[in-house]
Each structure stands twice: as structure tokens, then as C-alpha cells.
Amino acid sequence: MKIYRLLYYILPLFLISCGKDENQERAYESYIEDILSCMNMQRPTDSYNYPVLPGMDAWKNFQSTAEMIEACQIPITTLEELSSEAIFQALWEYPFFFEITYKAGYYQKNFETVFGDNNAYNMFLKRTNASEIIYNRLKLVEPVCSICSIYSRGLELFMSQSVFLDQLDYKQKQEIVSIALNNGRLRQEAIGYEQDVSREITMLLISRILYSADYEPFINKLDNKMMKFISTSVIQVYTKEEYDAFFQTIILNAQKFINFPY
């Protein structure tokens, strides 16, 4: 009887606590609803909730960007307990993620600025399944709509980092190039403007894969401009004709690469 009486008092408290947790989770996710909607997958169950996000009252009280960044720095001890999926989710929900796709021609520099000192990113680098996680998301994220375009291109920029490319085998590199070509085509069809800078990150990913795979037909065509683009994401062309020719070299080699025997 004593046990039943105890449960009579404890169970309602437990249910109330669960209800609070669910409400808090829904409230948190409401701030990142658009970001979550373009994932086409469930948010990892052990995902980290940032203590403050844009739109929250506390965020409005920050006096500097440095304060915002510090508030979103996840403790190492917390990261050590998270799955690789949850760590990447934290990068996905990081309030400054969008900045890596923001300034044309400086994508690599922006990437390093945003994530270089980020605890979650540096922990993710240590995970042996990191490239697999990025690759799986790359297959799922819608490449065209405005918010999804930012995040799918962000994924492409993540994937283009040599540390992740080194984890891929030849077949995986071919599959990613195929995905990137299709993403680029869909974006260009959607905007109807071939010189739009939204293609530059896609071309960066493809060129870096061709380079890392040591694809000989592409390697034989490398010049200083292409090598600079591959290493820094800076493109040194000055006319539409040069721009089109520059990326056409990458596209033609990519189309052959995806069917090249390995």
C-alpha cells in the first residue's frame, strides 16, 4: 500500500516534468523551425540546445558579436558525451552557420573564421564517421528553396574540406560529385542566371574532389587560377566569358569523372 501511495504522489510530478521538457523542446525548436524543416530527417535525440538563440530576449541584450559567439560555445565535456550526429546538428543550428555562404569569393576564409575556434567543429574533426554524416545529409537536403539553398551549400562547403574528403573512398567521391552536379543544375534552373555566385561553392567542392581523387584529365589541365580557386575559393576571372569557361572546365571533367572506372 505504501508503494502505491508513493506512486500516487510521484507519478503526477513525473508527468508534469516530462510535459515541461517537451514544451521546452518545442519552444526551442520554434526558433529554428526553418533550419530544421530543410533537413528532411529527424533531429538527433541527443541534440544540444543552445542556451540562447536569435529571436530570444536574451540574444537582444548582447552588446557585441563576441558575446554571442561565447554564449554559443559548447563546453568540451558536454561535446564528449554527444553522438557525432548531435555534434554536427549543433554546427547546423549554430547561429552563424549562414555566414560561411555569405561573401562570394571568400568562402574558405569565412568557413575558417566561423568554425576555426568552435569547440563543436574541432570535436567533430575527431570523429571517424564525420564525412559519412555530411554525405548522408547532402543527399537529403533540398538544394533550391532560399533557406535550404544556404544550408545545402553550407554542407557542400563542409564536405569540401580536405579533412573530410580524405575519409572518402573513390566511389563515394564519384557519388558526391554526381549529387553536386545535380544540385548546381537545379539551382541554376531555379534562378535562371548562370553567373549567380550560388554555383561557386558547388564548383569548389567538385574541383577539390577531382583534385583529391587525383583525376588525371583534370590534373593535367590545372593552371594557377584553378589551383588558387581550389586552395582558397578565390576565383580570378573578370568577364562572363572567362567565368563560364572556368566552370565549364570543372563541369566537363566532373561529368566524365562520375563514370570513370575505379
Image (cartoon, rainbow, N blue to C red):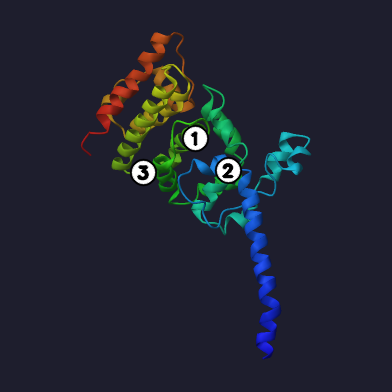
Q: Position of residue 175 (x, y in %)?
A: 31, 39
Q: Amino acid at mark 1?
A: Cys
Residue at 39 percent of width and 31 percent of height: 183
Q: Amino acid at mark 2?
A: Glu
Q: Position of residue 36 (x, y in %)?
A: 53, 44
| CB atoms of marks 2 and 3 within 8 Å | no
Q: Which residue is mark 3?
A: 168
Residue at 62 percent of width and 56 percent of height: 78
Sooner in the amino-acid sequence: mark 2 or mark 1: 2
Element type where label 1 sits in the image: helix
**Mark 2 crowdedness (10 Å alpha carbons): few <14, some 14-19, many ≥20:** few
Sooner in the amino-acid sequence: mark 2 or mark 3: 2
Q: Which residue is mark 1?
A: 148
Is residue 230 visible to the viewer in this orientation of the structure?
yes
Could you tell me which quadrant the C terminus lies in?
A: top left
| CB atoms of marks 3 and 1 within 8 Å | no
